[in-house]
Image (cartoon, coloured by chain):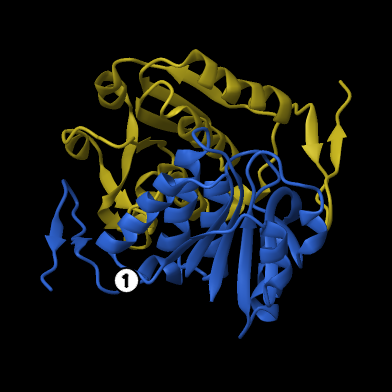
Chain colours: A yellow, B blue
Amino acid sequence: MIVVLRLGHRLGRDSRISTHVGLVARAFGADGIIYSGEKDQKMMESVKKITEEWGGPFEVEYEKNWRRVINNFNGIKIHLTMYGIPVQEKIEDVRKKSNGKDLMIIVGGEKVPGEVYDMVDYNIAITNQPHSEVAALALFLHEYFEGEELERNFEKPRIRVIPQERGKKIKKIKK
Amino acid sequence: MIVVLRLGHRLGRDSRISTHVGLVARAFGADGIIYSGEKDQKMMESVKKITEEWGGPFEVEYEKNWRRVINNFNGIKIHLTMYGIPVQEKIEDVRKKSNGKDLMIIVGGEKVPGEVYDMVDYNIAITNQPHSEVAALALFLHEYFEGEELERNFEKPRIRVIPQERGKKIKKIKK
């Protein structure tokens, strides 16, 4: 089981970024996301709606007390941060250590409390450059799954894409 | 030379996503980004400022007429879209065909005009699931460079990260 924890969501300002974090978590093979920070029902609904249409399973939850979420998690905890050790140096170790265990991937917003760095098993950088928690999460999951997440099938979708060289083709799936 | 073209930027609503697209372009090895849609000087300045602090080279430009930008580009043009052919089936072909040529990577916002699909050499999907243009761009560049972009060095940075297992360490670079 892989869960993403999104810290420090702010209403309005972070709405689209947090939506993208949730959709990336789902598309790249995580089993769910927990949002913390300001509760944003509308943003969470948009992620749930994608799961209903495009398939799951994928859980979307809110928890105000992120410290408890991290402390109570029984498994390997990874914080993605540009200040951490480069992913290419750590990913094999993470894969070995997390074998058979649950994994929590923590992504922050602009200001992550310093204590987070000490609450986790790994602080991992997807490049040591400033960019995006959306991209960092996608790259981490891609490296963790070694590309197999690109072939993931989702259960009970209502629609799916039929890949095309040109244009768009969507198939609606009958119940 | 690799340039990213970001279509259909909208003031306000897309500001942070477009910033992230620009920062990902830079961090994952593109040479510049061209924004189209509504002109957003403040958003573009935020990307330029990161390049000044963290190093380049990386160009940031605005072009209203995106059709001309695409038509005048001399090189291989790739449109990232969830409706396209999965990246894992096409990336080797793209790498061969673009060898020695310039590459343009086009990422849309929510509504990409249908004609874009016919103006490019490839329509490529980073999964056929809905997620994020930020993640799609990062994954495409990561696949294209086969992970070498993670080791990229930037010229003339003012600051850089010294990777740490715990906490943050930044080095300021003297001129």
Residue labelled with disc 1: B154
Residue A96 seen in the current view: no
In which quarter of the view is residue A29 placed?
top right
Left or right: B85 as drawn, with respect to B30: right
Which of these two is toward me, A86 or A113?
A: A113
Which of these two is toward me, B12 or B124?
A: B12
- Extreme residue in the left direction: B174
Which of these two is toward me, A113 or A79?
A: A113
Quarter occupied by the C terminus of chain A: top right
Relative to B115, say whether A22 is above or below. Answer: above
Relative to B12, say whether B107 is above or below. Answer: below
Residue B52 seen in the current view: yes
Residue B79 pos. (x, y %): 69, 58
Relative to A81, say whether B100 is above or below. Answer: below
Relative to B87, say whether A31 is above or below. Answer: above
**Which residue appears at 29% of the width and 74% of the height?**
B155
Left or right: A104 as drawn, with respect to B63: left
- Extreme residue in the bottom direction: B100
Which of these two is toward me, B58 or A163?
A: B58
Residue B47 pos. (x, y %): 39, 54
Which chain does tag 1 point to? Answer: B
Residue A45 pos. (x, y %): 57, 18
Report the label total: 1
Secondary structure of the residue carrying numbered label 1: loop
How many residues crowd mark 1 within 10 Å: few (<14), some (14–19), many (20+)? some
**Which residue appears at 38% of the width and 44% of the height?**
A98
Q: Amino acid at mark 1?
A: Phe
